[in-house]
Amino acid sequence: MTRFSRWFLLLVLLLSAGAQWKCGNSKGEHSPTPQPAPGADVLVVKAAPVQRQAWIATVPFSGSLHTLSTVDIKPEVGGRLVAVYFEEGDFVQKDQLLAEIDQVNYRLAFDQADAAFSVAEAGLDRAKVSAEHAETEKERADNLLRSGGITRKDHLAAVTGVKEAESQVRLAEAQVGQARAALEIHKKALKDCRILAPAAGQVQKKFFDKGSLLAAGTPLCTLVDNSRLELECVIPSYQLASIRLGQRSTFTTPTWGERRFEATVSAINPEIQPENRSVTLKLKISNPGGELRSGMYARGEITAGREENALVIPRDSLIPEEEGSGSAEIYVVRGGKAQRVSIKIGGSQQDRVWARQGLAGDELVITEIGPSLKDGARVRVLK
């Protein structure tokens, strides 16, 4: 092959390769772009429709029971206990005899005061007799003065005698009153040796036994009346607007399991605690059977009202927010996308929440909030 033939063959090969590259490149420009698999960017979510139903609005609470009547029995006189008629846990009635203090010294003091009273009365009688005699002598002196039988000086002495006798009567009357008061004091002290229950109740604590020496004012025992109890609790301040005096509530205690008891709102503290923005309530409890005891823990709810056409959603649909804010955010499905919506909470009960504002009632609420769920994300509801 000649040199010219070799160059001609090389040129033909180069032109053929260029044509093939251009053809291949043209096909690549017009070929379709690969598409992702259907549903690759769509989140599959669980959702529930908004329910319209009657809602009994409640305010949850927890707290402790306290008795309305706690009485420390303290004797008004001191002495040695000669008898004790109760034990811890006993029920006592009003004016029931609880214990007795030795009366010997108080009996002697009473007898002494009684005798002093008798002496004072006798002194009064004597003063009255003297006053009557002085008055008689004055009348006699008046007659003698008119007839000239005595001098004016003697008459003046008779008048002075009457005045002195009258002052002695007043002094004797005061002494009688003083002796009578002393007698009453000793009479009361003698009576106070018998220690009576000032109110009905149950003996919570007994401090002394028979033979103990007590000083006046020393506690002998403590009585509690569990027939009337009070439940003190706190609620968030944002729920205060729904609370009224007289509202009824129900509660349970660990002691009685699921058994429910009733109470009534009796007091609302006018101050909001700045530390936690809470309000203290007091609920009055009638407990005639005595099942409940002071110090028990209780948990329940106050019935604050009734909403006949409430919009109710699952609690799981709430996006976690600050506790007690009164508002929350949720995701609803609109046009195949997740939309973040703010709502006002009217109340919550177990696994349900009343959406007071923010929903129309025809939405689908997403009930599983995952990290991939964002506002505007494409979603598909799992059937």
Image (tube, rainbow, N blue to C red):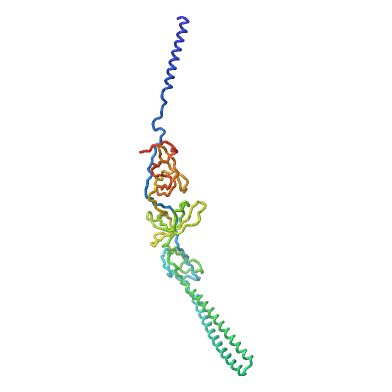
Number of numbered discs visible in the structure rendering: 0
For this view, does 217 lie left or right of residue 85? right
For this view, does 340 lie left or right of residue 122? left
Where's residue 205, x and y in %? Answer: 45, 63
Where's residue 108, x and y in %? Answer: 50, 77
Where's residue 144, x and y in %? Answer: 60, 94
The quadrant of the rendering that contains the C terminus is top left
Where's residue 299, x and y in %? Answer: 42, 54
Q: Which residue, as the protein is rendered here, is positioned at the far left? A: 383
Q: Is residue 149 above or below residue 33?
A: below
The quadrant of the rendering that contains the N terminus is top left
- Which residue occupies the foreground of this view, 103 or 12? 12
Residue 300 in view (yes/no): no
Please identify the quarter of the rendering in which residue 47 is found. Answer: top left
x 50%, y 70%: residue = 76
Q: Is residue 110 above or below residue 329?
A: below
Q: Is residue 358 above or below residue 104?
A: above
Please identify the quarter of the rendering in which residue 199 is found. Answer: bottom left
Residue 305 in view (yes/no): yes
x 47%, y 5%: residue = 4
Q: Is residue 228 above or below residue 78?
A: above
Q: Which residue, as the protein is rendered here, is positioned at the far top? A: 2
